[in-house]
Amino acid sequence: MSKAFHPPDSLSREDRLAMANLRRDVWTSGFKGLFYGSASGFVLHTTARFLDRYIDESTKKKIIGSSRQIKFNRNTVFLSVLLGGALGSFTGATVTGKNEVHNLHRVMEKGKKDTSSPYQQKINRAKEEELEGLETRKTRRMVRRKTIAKRLEEGNGLSDSHGGHWLDETDPDVK
């Protein structure tokens, strides 16, 4: 289940109520926007279809251009309703969220303070140290790769045997 339904114990009853009210308002406004947007999409489609019947061809070409003419049918009604509903829902929820965010300032201030238990603090420190260890390992790996590439470019081998220089078997001094 979402953490939104299980707020931390550090929040007071009023803070939890403020979060719940904001969530409820955003959802309510989203559904209102869905309804009004869908109705607006249907009305706009019906109006456009009505105007399409009574406008002559030359005016249509001036408005729309030389592209294909729009055929109004049940698919375009469905598109208009869904598009209007999506736009209305998004607009309603977003506007309400932005207008009501001032109610959460107290909650956000409480969230800045570290109220974790000693056990949680140890876990967080261990995670941070693990991340630091990963960074140092990555750095070492990159240094090793650079060293190997440098040795290969210089003509030295990867082995430390013979100082990185191999003897030629055809050399008469080698027995």
Image (cartoon, rainbow, N blue to C red):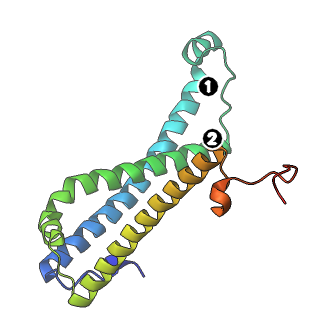
* Residue in the picture at 85% in, 54% down: 169
* Residue in the picture at 67% in, 59% down: 162
Residue 105 % position (x, y): 14, 63
Question: In the image, what residue type sits under mark 2?
Answer: Thr
Residue 130 % position (x, y): 39, 74
Question: In the image, what residue type sits under mark 1?
Answer: Arg
Q: Toward the viewer: 120 or 69?
A: 120
Q: How many numbered marks does the figure carry?
A: 2
Q: Distance between the residues labelled 2 and 1?
A: 16 Å
Task: Tell me if residue 60 can be seen.
Answer: yes
Q: What element carries label 1?
A: helix
Residue highlighted by disc 2: 76
Residue 32 % position (x, y): 36, 58
Which quadrant of the rendered structure holds the C terminus? bottom right
Task: Tell me if residue 38 can be seen.
Answer: no
* Residue in the picture at 65% in, 49% down: 156
Q: Toward the viewer: 163 or 152?
A: 163
Residue highlighted by disc 1: 53
Residue 126, picture quadrant: bottom left
Near mark 1 (Cα within 10 A), the count class, few <14, some 14-19 or many ≥20, is: few
Residue 135 falls left or right of residue 74: left
